[in-house]
């Protein structure tokens, strides 16, 4: 086995992925129970529940997004083991009949996790259930080097919530250290998905790419040879390029 010091990180290129994670069902919202058994040991139960309406709702959002992109949708499940995943896959296939222009493929969640590491550029739009999405989105986030690069949105009704994937980072509040790009890119998502303003959304995304191509970096994505800037400076650099 090669020594760790001899390994060099691969450069990730041409990766552009959108993940649709179902947010209101699955293990996180199913019935939960803890009980003491007759032998004195404790047992915990979490129930994974999905109905076809919940699955269809998130899948249609994913198909619609794929239509705006490269027309490829990967549905992630564990249909070889879980009954809920078998319903998931059956429902996705049924919905796909309304989107013949979108190429649909299926991956088991463990294989998807491996493929995100092996060849992330193969993905366009991914749709999956709540817990799988929770894990895979954090994994995918690190393809960019930092959660500070990842925008997100909660969609599904007349009102949508747009926010960066990371938390509020109170430990560095007011220190001009936070990466503002996830917040800025969340605004681009808002323009695209809520207001159907593709051109302004693309203008924001192009400005972010230009700043990064010019080698400006906040501390979380800093590397040798780059120009380090703070939160305010990074935001101003993006604004100037729009």
Image (tube, grey):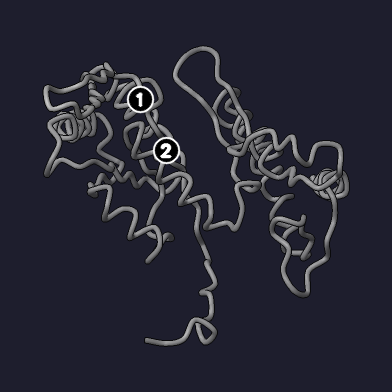
Mark yes or no: residue 48 visible.
Answer: no
Mark yes or no: residue 85 visible.
Answer: yes
Residue 138: x, y in percent? Answer: 48, 46
Placement of the N terminus among the 4 image quadrants: bottom left
- Judging depth in this view, the residue of 212 and 108 nearest the camera is 108
**Residue 58 shown left or right of residue 83 in the figure:** right
Q: With respect to residue 82, does 238 lie above or below?
A: below
Dot 2, how many residues are within 10 Å of its Cα: few (below 14), some (14-19), or many (20+)? Answer: some
Residue 69: x, y in percent? Answer: 45, 44
Residue 63: x, y in percent? Answer: 35, 34
| Residue in the image at 27% along x and 47% along y | 109
Q: With respect to residue 169, does 115 lie above or below?
A: below
Dot 1, how many residues are within 10 Å of its Cα: few (below 14), some (14-19), or many (20+)? Answer: some
The reply to whether discs 1 and 2 touch (Cβ–Cβ < 8 Å) is yes
User: Which residue is denoted by mark 1 in the rendering?
Assistant: 28
| Residue in the image at 34% along x and 47% along y | 72
Residue 163: x, y in percent? Answer: 62, 30
- Judging depth in this view, the residue of 104 and 83 nearest the camera is 83
* Residue that protrudes farthest toward the front in the picture: 40
Placement of the C terminus among the 4 image quadrants: top right
| Residue in the image at 37% along x and 28% along y | 22
| Separation of residues labelled 1 and 2 (CA atoms) | 10 Å
Q: Quadrant of residue 192?
A: top right
- Judging depth in this view, the residue of 227 and 167 nearest the camera is 167
Q: Earlier in the sequence, mark 1 or mark 2?
A: 1
Number of disc labels: 2
Q: Which mark is residue 52?
A: none
| Residue in the image at 33% along x and 44% along y | 73
User: Which residue is denoted by mark 2 in the rendering?
Assistant: 134
Could you tell me which secondary element the residue under label 2 belongs to?
A: helix
């Amino acid at each position: 086995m090669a020594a760790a010091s001899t390994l060099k990180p691969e450069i990730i290129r041409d990766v552009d992925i959108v993940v649709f994670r179902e947010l209101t069902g699955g293990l996180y919202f199913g019935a939960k129970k803890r009980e003491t058994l007759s032998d004195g040991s404790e047992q915990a139960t979490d129930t994974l529940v999905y109905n076809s309406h919940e699955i269809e709702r998130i899948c249609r959002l994913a198909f619609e997004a794929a239509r705006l992109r490269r027309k490829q949708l990967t549905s992630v499940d564990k249909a070889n083991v879980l009954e809920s995943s078998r319903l998931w896959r059956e429902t996705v296939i049924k919905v796909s009949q309304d989107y013949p222009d979108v190429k649909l493929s299926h991956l088991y969640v463990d294989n998807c996790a491996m493929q995100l590491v092996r060849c992330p550029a193969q993905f366009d739009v991914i749709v999956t259930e709540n817990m799988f999405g929770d894990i895979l989105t954090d994994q995918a986030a690190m393809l960019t080097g930092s959660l500070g690069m990842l925008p997100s949105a909660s969609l599904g009704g007349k009102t949508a919530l747009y926010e960066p994937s990371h938390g509020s980072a109170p430990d560095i509040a007011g220190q001009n250290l936070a990466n503002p790009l996830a917040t800025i890119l969340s605004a681009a998502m808002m323009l695209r998905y809520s207001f159907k303003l593709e051109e302004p959304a693309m203008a924001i995304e192009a400005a972010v790419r230009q700043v990064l191509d010019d080698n400006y970096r906040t501390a979380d994505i800093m590397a040798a040879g780059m120009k380090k800037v703070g939160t305010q400076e990074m935001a101003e650099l993006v604004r100037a390029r729009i």
